[in-house]
Image: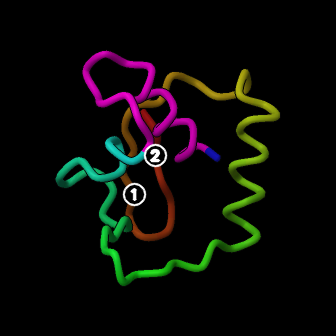
Amino acid sequence: ACVVACVMNRIDDSRFPNSIEEVLTQPYQFSGYYASDCYYPTVTDACIQAVDYYFEHSNEFGNYLYFEGNGTNNVFH
């Protein structure tokens, strides 16, 4: 849900593009995103729950614009 917050906060920030797709496809930003016409990702229940949680509780999240991780944990800024 914090990653969702980061994406949504970027959309609201004038320094970033103003659509989800444009935010996700910025070079070197979201390395897990794979843009291709022949790629069909599986959306997991955990992903759906994270998005739902964010939109139901968006006031609980900070103004995250960036995050970094070590493979186990993410830190949001």
The boundaries of the magenta stretch are 2-20
- Near mark 1 (Cα within 10 A), the count class, few <14, some 14-19 or many ≥20, is few
Task: Report whether 38 appears left or right of 55.
Answer: left
For label 1, the SS is strand
Residue 52 location (% of width, % of height): 77, 47
Spot occupied by residue 68 in the image (x, y as percentages of width and height): 36, 50
Give the side of residue 66 with respect to residue 61, left or right: left
Q: Residue at x 28, y 52 (%)?
A: 25
Identified by mark 2, the residue type is Val
- Residue located 23% across and 47% down the image: 26
Mark 1 → mark 2, Cα distance in angstroms:
6 Å
Q: Amino acid at mark 1?
A: Gly
- Residue at numbered disc 1: 69
Magenta stretch contains residue 30: no
Residue at 39 percent across and 48 percent down: it is 21
- Residue at image position (51%, 78%) is 41
